[in-house]
Structures are given as C-alpha cells and as structure tokens.
Image: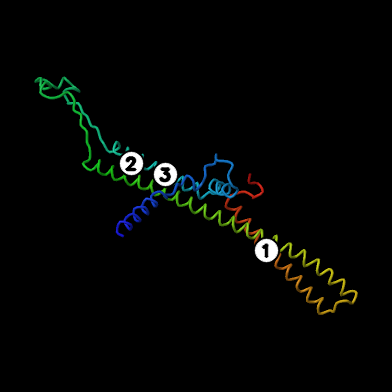
Amino acid sequence: MRNSIFLSLLLSSHLMLAQSVDYNKIILPGNVTNIEFEEKLVQLAWKNHPSNQLLYNNLQVAKHETKIASSEWLNTIRITGNLNEFTIDQSNDVNNRAQFFPRYNFGVQIPLGIFSGTSNQVKKGRQLEQVAQYNIEAQKLEVRALVLTLYNNYIMHREIFNLKSQELEEATASFVLLEQRFKTGEEKYDRYSAGLSALNKVKIDRVQAQTNYFNAKLELEQMIGLELEDVK
C-alpha cells in the first residue's frame, strides 16, 4: 500500500514537471502558417495590440539598466598623477635633490564598496529583467484566453442571430397567411392581433440578437486590430 502511494506521488510529480508551459506555443510565431482561424486571431492580437509592445519595451529597458550597472564601476575609479617640482623646473634643484624623489607619481582610487554595490545593482537589474519576462508570459496567457473567449462569444451570437433571422422569416410567412385569412373574414381579429404581437416580438428578438452579434464582432476586432473580413 505504501509503495503504491509512493509510486503515485512520484508519477504525479513527473507529470507536473512534464506539463510545464511552453510560452512559445501560447502565441504561435508569426511565420507559422496553415493554422486554425482562431489561432490566427491570437497571433494578430498579440502582434497588433499596443499594450503587448509596451511589455517588450519594459524588458529592453531592464536589460539596458543591467548593462549600465555592469559597467558603472568604471565611472567610480579615479586615476591621479603628478610630477615633482624639480621635474617641472630643474633650475630649482640647486642641491641635486631630484635624485631622491620619483619624477612622477600615479595613483588609483577605488571605493571600498564598489564591487559589492555594483554586484547588487546588477542583481537588481537581472531581477527586473525576469519580472519583465514574467509579465510578457502572463500577458500571453491572458491575451490567448481573452481572444478565444471573444471568438467563442462571436460564434455564439452569430449563430443566435442566424436562428433568429430564420425564425423571423418563418414568423413573417405565417403572419402573411394569417393576415390574408383575416382580410377574407376567415380569421377573427383577436387571432390576427395575437399573430401581429407574436411577429413583433420575433422582430425585437432578432434586433437584440443582431446587436449582440455586431457588438461581439466589434470586441473581437478591437483585440486583433483588424476587421474579421480582412483576416487571411
């Protein structure tokens, strides 16, 4: 029993590791063609929406900051030098004292905390790079989920609109017959009035379905930056 539980836990851990997200497949590269229509929509949304480019800009800024931090230590090192007075004007050396002093002096001033401080700045820059990369990956998941949700809503409302349009055609045809029978006295006014009310309700339902359909299309097009008819 214990061995079975252990094997189950071991297999579960391997499955979890094997199911790591491949973010390169969340948004397929632009050079990948022959894909399903909804995958093309996801591609377009990722390519065309300005907020996604902003995330890449943040990543580039973080990389730039890391590069600056890596070379910042060079700006804090000072090199100094001087010539002794006898080298500058040998006429002052009446006692030949220049031989006891170096002709020139050079020095390098390095702050004690330069390397630890630079190291911390570089670590901070790399962490900011990682955060920027995580934001990009999270945005990929969000864009994909949102686009596919909007696409499903669009398909649903389009289908409802088509059904309501068909229902309106049938209701209109039925009412025309009812109206003709009413004019010839074969139907009473109450039945004619009820038929007219039913037809108007179907018309209202179709208008609402059409509005929902058009709005769903607009929301999807807003994400991809193109009209659906232009998607190839």
Q: Are marks 2 and 3 in contact (CB under 8 Å)?
A: no
From the viewer's perspective, is residue 202 above or below residue 61? below
> Distance between the Cα atoms at labels 2 and 3?
12 Å
Helix, strand or loop under label 1:
helix
Local crowd at mark 2 within 10 Å, few (<14), some, or many (≥20)? Answer: many
The picture places residue 153, in percent across and down from the top left corner, at 60, 59
Residue ID for mark 3: 61
Task: State the mark number for residue 221.
Answer: none
> Distance between the Cα atoms at labels 1 and 3?
47 Å
Task: State the mark number for residue 69.
Answer: 2
Residue type (three-letter) at the residue carrying disc 3: Val
Relative placement, left or right, of 80 versus 58 is left
Residue type (three-letter) at the residue carrying disc 2: Ala
Q: Which residue is located at x 79 percent, y 74 percent?
A: 195
The picture places residue 140, in percent across and down from the top left corner, at 48, 50
Q: Quadrant of residue 66?
A: top left
Local crowd at mark 3 within 10 Å, few (<14), some, or many (≥20)? Answer: some
Residue ID for mark 1: 209
